[in-house]
Amino acid sequence: MAKVIFAGAGTAGHIEPALAVARQVLTMQPDLSAIFLGTATGLENSLVPAAGFTLSIIEKAPFPRRLNATAIKWPIRFLKTFSQVRGILKGADLVVGFGGYVAAPAYLSARLMRIPVIAHEANAKMGLANKLAARFGAEVLTAFPAPGARHVGIPLRSQITALAQQGSDERRNSKNQARDNFGISRDAKVLLIFGGSLGAQRFNDVIAGSLDSILENGITIIHGIGSSNELPNARPGYIPMPYISDMASAYAAADLVISRSGAVTVVETGSLGLYSLYIPLAIGNGEQAANAAYVVDRGGGEILANSDFSSDWLKRNIAGLMDRASAWSASGSRVDFPLDAAEVIARDVMAVIGRE
């Protein structure tokens, strides 16, 4: 039986693409052993077992970006993590990495154990772990076009891919059905706002301070609060949710999206033709701003600095955002991201393990 290790953990942006590929691989090779690497604190602890896959926990050892007490202890922590990963990789035929804290020790272990690696870079700017994989000679696939790289897109949930492939009549029917399910008027203007899989306290505060004004303008709000945040009371026109598990339905119901600009979110909203206000989180090497810029440069949205996003700003600008969202939707435009990434990567997996 072939054994494939999937290294993608931490947030939904790393986990969901890995799950999409793993599902596709198992449709091609049902007896394959697919094992996910994760840490004790990541979202993988709920998403991976729920999808029916084995999750092996390793110690989290992020590379320190500044000299402090944590940096001094890091080599010891990394060696422990490295040892754990080597044990899990024993007998593996392939490592498929999607970035995040678990990817770097997986790539290094695979290099020393002579196990092939396929690395997928979701962001418009490559992260440290995948730069390491590239240096080790791994095949690196990208979600955004990049010089010298193989552009395959990002694996999306099948429901969202199906929604992106619908014609105008089918899409209208999906919108009506989604709004019926949410209890939203089919004629309403709908704002979908969420801060990624973990939520965003700033978004929650902005909505709390502008809610009355937005509702008075006849706009309905679907609000992903974040599972660790306190859930506000629902009211007519306001639907707060701790975690939006059915993103396809939320997207189908929406006219306008306000979100961070993680790679998965940007590719989903761009592919669906949903006009979006992206508010990048200033993390890593600025990848969220680069992700958003790719769609914004093609007319699919706008970028606003996190520091500028406030209740007063939203009250002043929500009507204009809705107008531009309506115009973008009426044009039928969308950003042309590949929609078959899961199948493409799965075929690469099959080729490496000799099952194609």
Image (cartoon, rainbow, N blue to C red):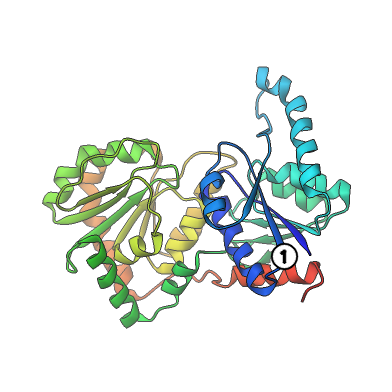
Q: Residues within 10 Å of mark 1 (few under 14, many from 20)?
A: some
Identify the residue at the far left of this view. 216
Residue 231: give x, y in percent of width and height: 29, 39
Which residue corresponds to the image point at 80% horizontal and 55% vertical from the top-left? 92
| Horizontal side, residue 338 vs residue 137: left or right | left
Q: Secondary structure at mark 1?
A: loop
| Snapshot quadrant of residue 190 | bottom left
Which residue corresponds to the image point at 71% horizontal and 68% vertical from the top-left? 31
Please tell me which residue lies in front, 326 or 165. Answer: 165
In the displayed structure, 290 sits above or below 227; it is below
Residue 307: give x, y in percent of width and height: 38, 35
In the displayed structure, 48 sits above or below 249; it is above
Instruction: Please identify the quadrant where the C terminus is shown.
Output: bottom right
Instruction: Please identify the quadrant where the N terminus is shown.
Output: bottom right
> In this rendering, does residue 56 appear at all?
yes
Residue 185: give x, y in percent of width and height: 17, 65
Which residue corresponds to the image point at 49% horizontal and 69% vertical from the top-left? 158
Q: Can you identify the residue that label 1 sits on?
A: 32
Q: How many marks?
A: 1
Residue 96: give x, y in percent of width and height: 71, 57
